Image (cartoon, helix red, strand yellow):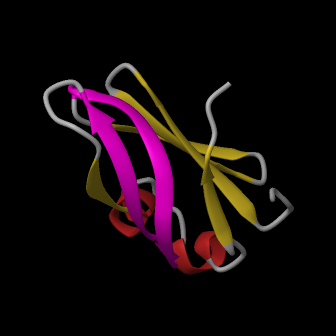
Amino acid sequence: MANSSTAFLSSKDNYSTFSFNGTTLTFLTSKNLERYTKVKKWDNGYIVVMAKNKSKPEHEDYIDLQPILENLYMEPESFLSKIKNVEVRYE
């Protein structure tokens, strides 16, 4: 269930988006990614996610948000510490 401590992960074309509390991070992903299907684990910036690619069946994949935030000159600890859950959401 979504609440103020829940972030959302999705993808479109070659990009993934991670949204939380009015901030959306957009980053390049595999051109073969069709969609994320389930978040298996959230660990303070490290996400274990199930994904469906064009070339293979659903599989486990990994996203590390810490270097993405650092490259954007954002403080990872202050942004990530408020997030308790991550859900896949496509609109």
Residue at position x 60%, y 72% from top?
A: 80
Q: Quadrant of the C terminus?
A: top right
> Is 76 one of the magenta-colored residues?
no
Expressed as whole percent of the image width and height from the top left, the position of residue 52 reads 32, 36
User: Quadrant location of residue 56?
Assistant: top left
Residue at position x 13%, y 27% from top?
A: 55
Q: Quadrant of the N terminus?
A: bottom right
> Is 37 one of the magenta-colored residues?
yes
Please state the total of marks drawn on the protein image: 0
Position above or below: 41 against 77: above
Over which residues does the magenta segment extend? 31-53
Expressed as whole percent of the image width and height from the top left, the position of residue 2 reads 81, 56
Expressed as whole percent of the image width and height from the top left, the position of residue 20 reads 70, 53
The furthest residue to the right: 3
Magenta-drawn stretch, dominant element (helix, strand or loop): strand
The residue closer to the viewer here, 42 or 67, is: 42
Residue at position x 47%, y 43% from top?
A: 37
The residue closer to the viewer here, 33 or 45, is: 33
52 sits to left or right of 22: left
Position above or below: 71 against 37: below
6 sits to left or right of 55: right
Expressed as whole percent of the image width and height from the top left, the position of residue 73 reads 47, 60
71 sits to left or right of 59: right
14 sits to left or right of 54: right
The furthest residue to the left: 55
User: Quadrant location of residue 79?
Assistant: bottom right
User: Quadrant location of residue 28?
Assistant: top left
